[in-house]
Amino acid sequence: MSTVSVRSPRRLAGTLRLPGDKSISHRALILNAIAHGRAQLRGLSQGADVASTAGCLRALGAEMGEGWVKGRGLAALRPAPGPLDCGNSGTTMRLLAGLLAGRPFPSTLIGDDSLSRRPMDRVVVPLRQMGAAADQGSLRVGGRPLRGIRYASPVASAQVKSALLLAGLSAEGRTEITEPAHSRDHSERMLAALGAPLDVAPRRVAIDGPFDALQARDVEVPGDFSAAAFWLVAASLHPEAELRLLSVGQNPTRTALLDVLRRMGATFSLSAEQEVSGEPFADMEISTAAQLRPIQLQPNEAAYLIDELPVLAVAASLLPGTSRLTGAAELRLKESDRIAAMAEGLDRLGVDVRELADGWEIIGPACLRGARVSSHGDHRVAMALAVAALLAEGETEIESADCVDISYPNFWQDLERVCVS
Ligand code: S3P
């Protein structure tokens, strides 16, 4: 496992094209693999998580190559020769559990140590209500017919919602999901674009099954907003910064970080706004914030920026006053316990941080000092700590730094590119 050393540069400057959005990439592959026809997929994430999805779909008989997928319908999927390896990817495991629950053959889904520890009951419980033979140990699904249900999800989770929509394609009747907060809606957008019989209302979505007539559609994947978040925070807090980020996804279910950055005092602008393949894109420019105020998250706000919270905790460390980032207990169930991992890393860098059950209380501004920190093998923790290192005095060593490959394989090269000494 690699260790990377980072120092604060004199300036942060340049233009970056970010990796393809991870959530949209998974969906572009899965939905086109079960659609009819050939789809060209441009800008797909090259990260390991999306490679896990592609590997599983290939094992299920989908035809695909560099940037294209050819589907012959849901019914053409055939049993994989062995267990489906989802690697580190919760999205792969949960979405494929839903997709495969209603297939006439059994499938087993496995993952790495981190994924094996993550909760799957959130998909197994509703899938069993739909009639599935779903078993949690090593996740086994399939071989039984499904019926539609009305399910009120206790968590706002796009993975749960998407799993049930995919199961709904094989189920008899209507499958309806309501959620406590509106989770990212990439599945709804893409299912609708491929012709699925969806009924969408605020915090509720329903699909009428069985349905096996999705039509393949070319997809252009935007840059990942969650990858942009690292640079948005780094540029806001560095004393001399100006960054341009090209073609970044602006889906409103993903961009709540921008509201928080605005309240914090950040200065950024959007240009070249356009809608491509049913998703909004824009170029973003961000420079050093003119003033800084502490952050208080509003009730429910954490659900809308769950993947951006580790790097927001870094921002809070440099804001004057007490920031409270709360309502984020879900962070303990991600690739690592992100609340504990960030509290440990920030504490080592000299931050006055208190770990809460559902987030952090951070008293700033800290004078960050380089130290040896661990990513705990979690890509977003590694990149958030790298941002802290860009803002710290002295050298920071980040252990297990290669885990950035999960979502942003060129992260360390991009970091070098924007550091001007
Ligand atoms: C994702 C949904 C979110 C997010 C994850 C990707 C998706 O997880 O944290 O990185 O692509 O559906 P939850 O659905 O568990 O909130």
Image (cartoon, grey):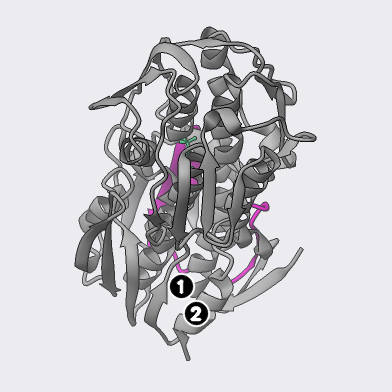
Label placed on residue 8: 2
Residue 29: x, y in percent?
Answer: 51, 47
- 375 or 18, nearer to the observer: 18
Magenta stretch encompasses residue 304: no
| SS category of the residue bearing label 1 | loop
- 45 or 376, nearer to the observer: 45
| SS category of the residue bearing label 2 | loop
The residue drawn where x is 41% and y is 18% is 209
The residue drawn where x is 48% and y is 15% is 171
Residue 282: x, y in percent?
Answer: 26, 64
Segment colored magenta = 354-378
Residue 265: x, y in percent?
Answer: 22, 62
Label placed on residue 391: 1
Q: Residue furthest bottom?
A: 421
Are the two marked residues, 2 and 1, in contact with CB atoms closer than 8 angstroms? yes
- 377 or 409, nearer to the observer: 409
Magenta stretch encompasses residue 367: yes
Look at the picture and state if 57 lies above or below 228: above
Q: Is residue 168 visible?
A: yes
Q: Amino acid at mark 2?
A: Ser
Q: Please rate how many residues cluster around mark 2, counting C-alpha atoms within 10 Å: few if below 14, some from 14 to 19, many from 20.
A: many
Q: Quadrant of residue 213?
A: top left
Lateral position of residue 115 relative to residue 368, left or right: right
Q: Quadrant of residue 301?
A: top left
